[in-house]
Image: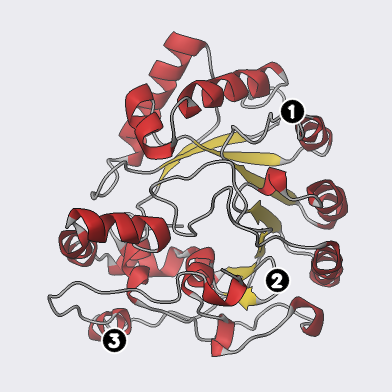
Amino acid sequence: MDGDHVSREIRLPEKTLEPFQQTLIRHGLKLERGKTTTLQVNVGLLCNQVCRHCHLEAGPHRKERMDLETAEAVMSYAGRNRFDTIDITGGAPELNPNIFALVEGLSPLTRKLMFRSNLTALDHKTTGRLMDLLKDREVHIVASLPSINQAQADSQRGEGIFRKSIDALQKLNSMGYGRLETGLLLDLVCNPAGAFLPASQEQLAKRFREVLMNKWGIVFNSLFAFANAPLGRFHHWLEKTGHLESYFERLTSSFNGCAVDGLMCRTLVSVSWDGYFYDCDFNLARGLHMGNGKIHVSEMDGAPLSGSPIAVADHCYTCTAGAGFT
């Protein structure tokens, strides 16, 4: 499966679903770009995990990865535009052979370099030195930890994953990550394990802090609770278990027009492993290119213009449900 065929199709519930664009119109809303301040870089779909909630269907079998030529084009583009934030993601970005070059090349070009990790690839025997590089460059680590319940986490991500994640968090803490006095930021991201929306982010953060500290002595800076997008492997699971229609009903009934102004796609542009632009990583998974046309990073001089339209589809209900996805 190549970059032009990633979860392009999505089968909607049998019940008629109001298109997301129509919902925006009905509420008198527009979804268009403000100032683009964040460059997200998806370096590929290779991953050491096969998570049930993954919208990209990342896994050990995936071959899509950013090559050195594309990585250099991304660094050149970042140098021309000086984004406030650059966000490296995947798959497991640790497994891309050019990840050291990207971290070293991008860190001087932005105020904040973020690195998204599933934790278990971060301290892998072939990528262990990466932790030292991230610390040296003061890279902000955003780590996925879907649950503090071992059985639940392993069910969602794979047997033994929870224990490896705890070990990685403890190592990051020992390096200074997550501790206020060091300035080395360690944030956590959790996703629901089933066909429901996340609990209160504030309540989850409090619970995570208490359990992680009391059981393993782990600290972190912030926690973000996000709903799962009905794309990729999660969409297949919803369909297989008969939860697809009810999940869409939860998303649509929880639509919050107030969340639109703060959506990440208004200030972010995403570049894929093959160098093409998208409005966000979910649109990348769906195959919806930015501006409904394929624009390569080597062909783009500036950031997308304020007021530009954002490509939308029904998975966008995920980002406007409840508190939203910012």
Q: Residue at x 39, y 50 (%)?
A: 53
Q: Secondary structure at mark 2?
A: loop
Q: Residue 140, relative to residue 6: is it above or below?
A: above
Q: Nearer the viewer, residue 74 or 269?
A: 74
Instruction: Using the image, tell me which numbered label, if any, was put on residue 25.
Output: 3
Marks 3/1: CA–CA distance: 51 Å
Q: Residue at x 54, y 78 (%)?
A: 33
Q: Amino acid at mark 3?
A: Ile
Q: Residue at x 79, y 49 (%)?
A: 97
Q: Amino acid at mark 2?
A: Asp
Q: Secondary structure at mark 1?
A: loop
- Local packing at callout 3 (Cα closer than 10 Å; few below 14, some 14-19, many 20+) is few
Q: Which residue is mark 1?
A: 125
Q: Amino acid at mark 1?
A: Lys
Q: Residue 293, relative to residue 167: is it above or below?
A: below
In the rendered view, how is the structure colored? secondary structure
Marks 2/3: CA–CA distance: 34 Å
Q: Earlier in the sequence, mark 3 or mark 1?
A: 3
**Where is residue 266 shown, x and y percent of the image?**
52, 71
**Where is residue 320 shown, x and y percent of the image?**
33, 64
Q: Which residue is mark 2?
A: 274
Mark 2 or 3: the one toward you: 2
Marks 2/1: CA–CA distance: 27 Å
Q: Residue at x 81, y 71 (%)?
A: 77
